[in-house]
């Protein structure tokens, strides 16, 4: 067998690309095995197309409301062909960064093929044996299709296939009100589809702060989207779906296309994990310890396949830590508590750490929240987007353990709150840094200042005593 690679990465998506680039930069001998297109879900079917679509939809939405600013408002559906072209252009501009040529220039050997373990220390790419010291499994996840009767026969779209639609669907049924369902549901509605979202849980975006999800729901409804939460989808047949809504009413919803957005399943089939002694979780994800090592000490995993938070930035952070641990023997572990994420709907919703309720379960009833309504944030008012809020979740001892931001640029504003959570800051610590006025970053700052003011008021006796003392001195 040939000289082993220091690291063989399986999968050229967000996790695999980060891992291969870092390993090469460290001077390791690295190979990347990809069965399909380099770039993974984020580039081809996930973040890049969905964010481009959302921007197109936001432009259309703004054009429809142009009369608020003295222009004639646009009407009618958007030109899907033009929008789809714009989506492809965005992908095309990013693709060269992830191309085999770009990676080869960095010293990475790109191997086309399907990887499969043939033993604890043996791996094949198609039929070629690839020798390794360490392997990183970064094979990602695929859309999960729920067992709703009739769904397989109807052949719903997923985030893998929705981009190939030849035309804008007149009526779109979206199954699942999570990140994909809400983002794409709102985008298609703004472009001109009549959208219905069916979500099994009581709130949209069930992992996020319920008040944030409820505000999004109000926006979606105001834009003409029908939203059923706490609903049971009983069956789907060509052109119609039968559901029972939260109040027990039976409904039939007509559709031209169905988009299934009900979560993800790990891509581990045919990887030969058992042969390699790599254990999986009950959900089939690759089980790792906090340092990303699997039950086979030579094998690490990163990204969606681990069942951690399925986001591109999380995949990248896991991949980097896994490479440093595998190649240099470090003991790095990604800080899950301080992992921010954002859903790019309008309003945009971002979160870090636990929700208020999760924090109470963890730290007790003395957990408090400090909420700054964006009516008190001038930048939000100037943008006519002041119904959002910033919320700090405070540990009984005053540490910021979590936060949510709902409003324009929430994904940017959450970053300093992620710093605060990671570094265990109090609101006072955050408030000490001056923020420019009027910015969307004002939300976290004003929330922190409100908490400082509250604490000052709570210490009124001390403050009053100081005032009295000063009056006496400066008489
Ligand atoms: C519609 C949508 C929008 C999203 N938007 C965002 C967003 O805005 N922000 C965000 O942070 N995240 C977003 N995500 C999530 C993000 O796309 C994923 O978390 C990320 O792509 C996961 O990266 P990964 O490397 O784990 O897997 P992937 O990107 O899926 O890469 C895995 C790669 O492994 C390859 N592979 C699989 N099996 C084998 C094998 N046996 N041999 C060789 N190669 C193999 C696959 O072909 C693939 O290229 C979105 C997801 C979706 C679906
Ligand atoms: N902005 C972002 O970062 C972003 C955007 C899109 C996707 N993503 C990632 O992609 C992953 C996949 O997104 P997703 O929306 O498919 O998954 P998700 O887990 O976010 O949401 C799936 C939703 O479907 C619901 N559901 C499941 N079965 C159902 C059924 N039979 N009927 C009705 N509802 C049902 C669930 O309750 C859940 O709310 C997410 O976990 C997210 O991390 C991220």
Image (cartoon, rainbow, N blue to C red):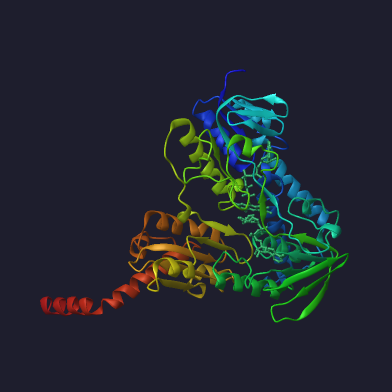
Tell me what residue is drawn at x 25 percent, y 79 percent. Answer: 460
Can I make out residue 446 in this image?
no
Choose between 75 and 41: the one closer to the eye. 41
- Asked if residue 340 lies left or right of residue 251, the reply is left
Q: Residue at x 68, y 71 (%)?
A: 220
Assign the C terminus to one quadrant of the image.
bottom left
Q: Percent position (x, y) of residue 426?
A: 35, 63
Q: Position of residue 358 (x, y in %)?
A: 48, 67
- Picture quarter with the N terminus: top right
Q: Is residue 426 above or below residue 329?
A: below
- Would residue 345 be found to the left or right of residue 235 on screen? left
What is the tally of numbered marks visible in this picture?
Answer: 0
Where residue 246 sits, quadrant-wise, is: bottom right
Q: Residue at x 56, y 38 (%)?
A: 18
Q: Quadrant of ligand 2?
A: bottom right
Q: Is residue 454 above or below residue 272?
A: below
Could you tell me residue 116's position as x and y percent? 67, 33
Residue 168 visible? The answer is yes
In the displayed structure, 88 sits above or below 474; it is above
Depth check, front residue: 120 or 457? 120
Say which residue appears at 53% left-offset and 36% top-offset: 296
Percent position (x, y) of residue 317? 51, 44
The quadrant where residue 51 appears: bottom right
With respect to residue 273, does 460 lie above or below? Answer: below
């Amino acid at each position: 067998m040939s000289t082993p690679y220091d690291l063989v990465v399986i999968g050229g998506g967000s996790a695999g690309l980060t891992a291969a680039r870092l390993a090469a930069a460290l001077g390791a001998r690295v190979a990347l095995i990809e069965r399909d297109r380099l770039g993974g879900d984020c580039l081809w079917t996930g973040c890049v197309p969905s964010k481009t679509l959302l921007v197109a939809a936001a432009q259309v939405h703004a054009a429809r409301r142009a009369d608020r600013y003295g222009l004639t408002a646009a009407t009618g559906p958007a030109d899907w062909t033009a929008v789809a072209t714009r989506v492809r252009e965005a992908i095309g501009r990013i693709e060269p960064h992830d191309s085999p040529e770009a990676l080869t220039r960095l010293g990475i050997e790109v191997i086309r093929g399907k990887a499969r373990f043939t033993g604890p220390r043996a791996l094949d790419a198609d039929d070629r044996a690839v020798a390794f010291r360490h392997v990183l499994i970064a094979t990602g996840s695929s859309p999960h299709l729920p067992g709703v009767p009739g769904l397989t026969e109807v052949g719903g779209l997923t985030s893998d296939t929705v981009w190939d639609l030849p035309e804008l669907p007149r009526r779109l049924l979206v199954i699942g009100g999570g990140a994909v369902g809400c983002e794409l549901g709102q985008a298609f509605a703004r472009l001109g589809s009549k959208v219905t979202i069916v979500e099994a849980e009581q709130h949209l975006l069930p992992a996020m702060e319920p008040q944030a999800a409820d505000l999004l729901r109000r926006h979606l409804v105001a834009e003409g989207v029908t939203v059923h939460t706490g609903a049971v989808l009983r069956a789907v047949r060509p052109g119609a779906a039968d559901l029972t809504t939260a109040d027990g009413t039976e409904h039939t919803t007509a559709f031209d296309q169905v988009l299934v957005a009900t979560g993800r399943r790990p891509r581990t089939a045919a990887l030969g994990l058992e042969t390699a002694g790599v254990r999986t979780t009950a959900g089939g994800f690759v089980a790792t310890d906090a340092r990303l090592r699997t039950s086979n000490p030579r094998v690490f995993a990163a990204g969606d396949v681990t069942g951690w938070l399925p986001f591109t930035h999380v995949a990248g952070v896991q991949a980097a830590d896994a490479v440093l641990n595998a190649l240099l023997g470090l003991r790095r572990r990604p800080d899950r508590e301080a992992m921010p994420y954002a859903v790019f709907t309008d309003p945009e919703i971002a979160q870090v750490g636990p929700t208020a309720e999760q924090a109470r379960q963890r730290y007790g009833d003395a957990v408090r929240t400090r909420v700054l309504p964006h009516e008190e944030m001038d930048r939000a008012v100037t943008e006519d987007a002041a119904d959002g809020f910033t919320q700090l979740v405070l540990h009984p001892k005053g540490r910021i353990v979590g936060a949510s931001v709902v409003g324009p640029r929430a994904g940017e504003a959450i970053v300093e709150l992620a710093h605060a959570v990671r570094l265990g800051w109090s609101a006072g610590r955050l408030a000490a840094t001056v923020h420019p006025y009027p910015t969307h970053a004002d939300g976290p700052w004003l929330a922190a200042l409100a908490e400082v003011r509250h604490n000052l008021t709570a210490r009124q006796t001390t403050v009053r005593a100081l005032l009295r003392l000063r009056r006496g001195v400066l008489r």
